[in-house]
């Protein structure tokens, strides 16, 4: 029998207003290219993908996230890219704040110090807005600003034709250990 695991990642987690704004900006782009739009309630910006972990590790990940001084980060999205290899259509942030990159670097260092492997590819601050996209979008201007105030430890669960995302822990962005709660 295979041991139960949780597929997890850390992400900037938009509030309802930001989700609605991102979804509204994404709608004409997704309509132009087809594919499968990411549901508004699943929109996020991944900071560190970890993957499958044992249930006992989830608590350690939540405690680890509490130790980070998560900054409030204002992100401006002005570009759309189609990532052929994954079939994803993404909104790219223009010049993400250095403090966000610093917090991500600290997170990766703390994960490594605890023996937890994470994806360490260079950080490209983006929000995936569609999957299964077969061709690039027509030229389209995007002007979207999102002030991210929450970071989440999120579990990804397979769902028919998609995945479902569920925050396991949330942190208010503004300082170490502030505003933490487990959902």
Image (cartoon, rainbow, N blue to C red):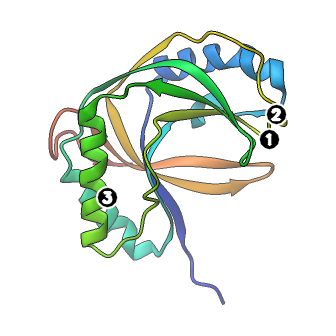
At numbered mark 3, what does the secondary structure look like: helix, strand or loop? helix
Cβ–Cβ under 8 Å for marks 1 and 2: yes
Real-space Cα separation, disc 3 to disc 1, in angstroms = 29 Å
Q: Name the foreground residue: 106 vs 7.
A: 106
Residue 132: assigned label: 1
Real-space Cα separation, disc 3 to disc 2, in angstroms = 32 Å
Residue 12 locus on image (x, y percent): 41, 37
Q: Which quarter of the figure has residue 128?
A: top right
Residue 20 locus on image (x, y percent): 56, 17
Q: Is residue 13 left or right of residue 59?
A: right
Residue at 66% from the left image edge and 90% from the top image edge: 1
Real-space Cα separation, disc 1 to disc 2, in angstroms = 5 Å
**For mark 2, does the 10 Å Cα neighbourhood hold few (<14), some (14 to 19), or many (20 or more) residues?**
some
Give the mark count: 3
Q: Which residue is mark 3?
A: 108
Disc on the earlier residue, 3 or 2: 2
Q: Which residue is mark 2?
A: 35
């Amino acid at each position: 029998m295979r041991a139960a695991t949780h597929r997890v990642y850390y992400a900037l987690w938009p509030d309802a207003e930001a989700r609605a704004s991102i979804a509204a900006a994404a709608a004409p782009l997704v309509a132009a290219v087809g594919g499968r739009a990411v549901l508004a309630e699943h929109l996020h910006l991944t900071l560190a993908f970890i993957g499958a972990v044992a249930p006992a590790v989830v608590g350690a990940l939540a405690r680890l996230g509490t130790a980070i001084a998560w900054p409030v980060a204002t992100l401006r999205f002005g570009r759309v890219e189609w990532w052929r290899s994954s079939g994803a259509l993404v909104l790219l942030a223009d010049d993400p704040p250095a403090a966000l990159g610093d917090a991500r670097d600290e997170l990766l260092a703390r994960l490594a110090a605890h023996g937890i492997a994470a994806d360490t590819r260079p950080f490209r601050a983006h929000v995936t807005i569609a999957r299964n996209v077969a061709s690039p979008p027509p030229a389209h201007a995007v002007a979207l600003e999102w002030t991210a105030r929450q970071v989440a430890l999120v579990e990804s669960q397979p769902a028919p034709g998609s995945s479902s995302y569920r925050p396991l822990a949330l942190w208010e962005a503004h300082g170490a250990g502030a505003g933490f709660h487990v959902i």
